[in-house]
Image (cartoon, helix red, strand yellow):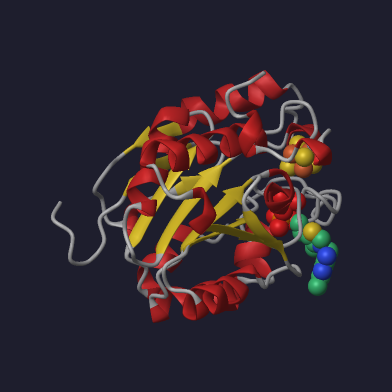
Amino acid sequence: MHPLDPYLRANKLPHIWCPGCGIGIFLGQLIRALKELGVDWNRIVIISGIGCAGRISTYINCDTAHVIHGRAVPFAEGVKLAKPYLKVIVVGGDGDILSIGGNHFIHASHRRTPISVIMINNMIYGMTGGQMAPTTPHKALTTTTPRGNPYEPLNSVAIAYAAGAEFIARWSVAHPIQLKNSLKKMFSKEVFGFLEVVSPCPEIFGRLNRLRDPVDLLRTIKEICVIKNNINPMDATIDWPNKIVCGDFKVPGEPA
Ligand SMILES: Cc1ncc(C[n+]2csc(CCOP(=O)(O)OP(=O)(O)O)c2C)c(N)n1
Ligand code: SF4
């Protein structure tokens, strides 16, 4: 038996994720972070929308809601308003949180509803076969940008900062220890927290962008990540395949 087995819904396995996908690494670190913090498992609610990342609410064995695409954040705000003593966590893909859900993300950051929002950024729409996301890098190939994405990607941590989020971080699944520690830091605060997790999608993003091998894709993510804790999130560049700035960033009211 694996030590994390009690925290997973065995009757929902096998999972849908492709071999080499980063979402499973994230799920392991999410469970470890909650366990290590000692949060009462009966007071955790995990809410997700639709997408590969959104399937986390199917597999984790706590109170969950798998809601419609893009609406996980307002659903979570409702849960938190009704039962403020719960630890309410949203997990979604970059499409779910920043595209169809972008409006909700901005306003929840602005209202500072004390929930934690985690965006798994695989730089593409994975579940639906590889359409361009707002986080898709400039020039990257997707099924809807076969000649390369003409747009620069949105920088989610800069948006969270501009809107008013009170905890802001970016890590990748190639940094599992820092990722777990950042999750613990965010969960220990009763503030609107936002954590972006860069995660490899070898099956869709990698295949379309000549990084089909999961190890090569994960290694590339690790190599281009530069850790800069305590910087202003506005300076946290995300520029695939050159540089991705990771860290627990500085937000107003926090000492450097
Ligand atoms: C209202 C609505 N519009 C569109 C869809 C189709 N759809 C399902 S998942 C998805 C995007 C998935 O991308 P992302 O949120 O980045 O998650 P990933 O699968 O990459 O983890 C879309 C457009 C839907 N299910 N509901
Ligand atoms: S399509 Fe991409 S994000 Fe979705 S499960 Fe497969 S590798 Fe992961």
Residue 149 in percent (x, y) is at 70, 54
Depth order, front residue of 186/153? 186
Depth order, front residue of 99/66? 66
Residue 120 in percent (x, y) is at 60, 49
Residue 116 in percent (x, y) is at 46, 60
Residue located at (63% from left, 20% from top): 2
Q: Give the left or right position of residue 34, taking residue 253 as reference.
A: right
The N terminus is located in which quarter?
A: top right
Q: How many marks?
A: 0
Q: Give the left or right position of residue 139, taking residue 234 as reference.
A: right
Say if 253 sits above or below 41 in the image: below
Say if 75 sits above or below 200 in the image: below
Picture quarter containing residue 234? bottom left
Residue located at (52% from left, 41% from top): 30
Residue located at (72% from left, 44% from top): 59
Picture quarter containing residue 61? top right
Residue 152 appears in view: no
Residue 180 appears in view: yes
In what quadrant does ligand 1 lie? bottom right
